[in-house]
Image: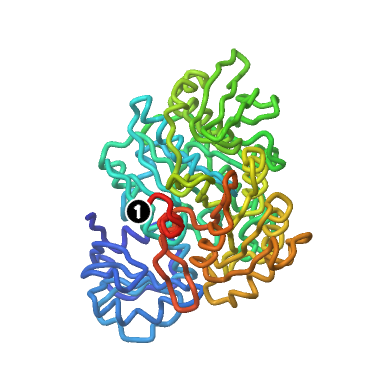
Amino acid sequence: MPEMSVSDLIENIPILEMRGDPRTVVKGIAYDSRDVKPGFLFAAMGGVHTDGHGYVEDALGRGATAILHARPLPVDAGAAVCIRVENPRIALSPIAAAFYKWPSRSIRTIGVTGTDGKSSTVWFITQLLGFLGRKAGFLSTVSFQTAEEIVKNPFRQSTPEASEIQGMLREMVRQGKEFAVVEATSHGLSRRMNRLGDVQFDAAVMTNVTHEHLEFHGSFEQYRSDKANLFRSLSPDAPKDVGCPRFAVVNGDDPSAAYFTEASRVPVFSYGLSGKADLVARDLRMDITGTSFVMAEARGAVETRMSIPGIFWVENALAACLAVAHAAEVPPLSLAAYLPRLRGVLGRMDYVDQRQPFAVIVDYAHTPGAFLKLFPWVRANTRGRVIVVFGSAGERDNAKRPMQGKAAADHCDVVIVTDEDPRGEDRMQIIEQVAAGCAGKKRGEDLFLIPDRREAIRFALSLAEPGDTVLLLGKGHEGSIIGPGGSMQWDERAEAVAALHERGFGA
């Protein structure tokens, strides 16, 4: 674990007031008082449900030697250094970057943003770099890899706090990684959160931008602008310890492509299905086991195939190929040979096979945009009915709820609305808001409101007949459901398997 004096840590941040000896050594950083160890700096950050200032006494009791705070402290800090700033959350980013010795300057860092497809694109980029013999680590909603082992993401936020991000980047550098591939969410890129504010990116990838997280950003325009901070951060002349061409990649078919292109000060390359992009996929031929297509650019074309079915996976693979081609300086078409070897992300188009005569798929899709990509493909590849189970997160963007309902009602035969993560909201109110968008569906016939997710899954599978497809959406890889009383352990795939066993399949 590194050590650094307080004076060195705060060199790059504006200080309102400081008490104590600036020569005090800091041995670690924590924003949860339960994680504080002797010699740590404790960042008293404000949150949605709690405020870190109320835990300063606990942090001091655990040995904190420095407190980063905004408001007057409720207790005597004794010999601990007290650093008052306007916003501890914003200040945490440069402090963490300094503590871990600015690791993103020593590794080629690729950021991936967008509403849908971020985790998959991060994972595809990492795999392609590996196929080329280049050592890469990654951070995503689903999992992390800083050394050899891939670890499931333990946080209930796609982009962790700055101290965790900087620590993982430093570990990648220590492990000799050449590339870091980072999922960059709108929350992480927002100036209000500043989780990624002191990560020096060398490349940016945009997958798409649709309706999401307006409960935080306030408007679509602000949501898109916060995502574009990734592109604005790309500096053609920022100092770097390792040589790396700086560039950006956009989805040329997305209406926001021009907006992101204009935000960039470095060369921008495009991908898409329309034929107008730098790298395109054409002649798509899909079946339940995968997608064959022609990958083409100005200098030629090559036939390839992915063993993961769906147009959206092709789009994510194109984004990954274009990013890797420019990062590793290889021809884009040379990567087509590796596409059949790409593996999908846990909880993304995850087929549950217990020898049942109908398809059961677990997927993380939870936005209207993701639904509108997924449902038509499933509809086209299903002989029987499409039965969908999904919910909408509490204390999150409620404007998207009827939009989710409409997308499901328009493309699925049976819609079952259930809990996702209701948090402190009334679960039935959330479900009713989703159901309000399900015009044309009749309750009790092809629209069912079942708040208990376990019960909803079992009901969906009890309806399934040979040739049907049952979609279990929204939870994917996540290991818990958050309700008013806190988190409950959850494994969507395991629940589906258990329910199929109860029906006599695969037991």
The residue shown at (60%, 19%) is 296
Give the total number of marks visible in the rendering. Answer: 1
The residue shown at (43%, 64%) is 480
User: Farthest residue toward the bottom?
Assistant: 75
User: Would residue 148 be found to the left or right of residue 381 on screen?
Assistant: left
Task: Identify the image quadrant of residue 490.
Answer: bottom left
SS class of the residue under badge 1?
A: helix
User: Would residue 493 be found to the left or right of residue 359 on screen?
Assistant: left
User: Farthest residue toward the front?
Assistant: 504
The residue shown at (55%, 33%) is 319
Picture coordinates of residue 401, whole percent (x, y): 67, 63
Decide: few, some or many residues near mark 1? Use Cα within 10 Å; few <14, some 14-19, many ≥20. some
Picture coordinates of residue 120, whole percent (x, y): 49, 42
**Between 294 and 167, which is closer to the camera in this rendering?**
294
Picture coordinates of residue 116, whole percent (x, y): 58, 47
Vertical relation: 119 (above or below) 194: above
Picture coordinates of residue 208, whole percent (x, y): 63, 43
Vertical relation: 102 (above or below) 487: above
**Between 244 and 183, which is closer to the camera in this rendering?**
183
How is colour applied across the structure in the image? Answer: rainbow
Vertical relation: 219 (above or below) 384: below
User: Would residue 282 be found to the left or right of residue 486 on screen?
Assistant: right
**Residue identifier under label 1:** 98
User: Farthest residue toward the right?
Assistant: 440
Task: Identify the image quadrant of residue 497.
Answer: bottom left
Q: Looking at the figure, which quarter contains the N terminus?
A: bottom left
Kind of residue at disc 1? Ala
Vertical relation: 364 (above or below) 71: above
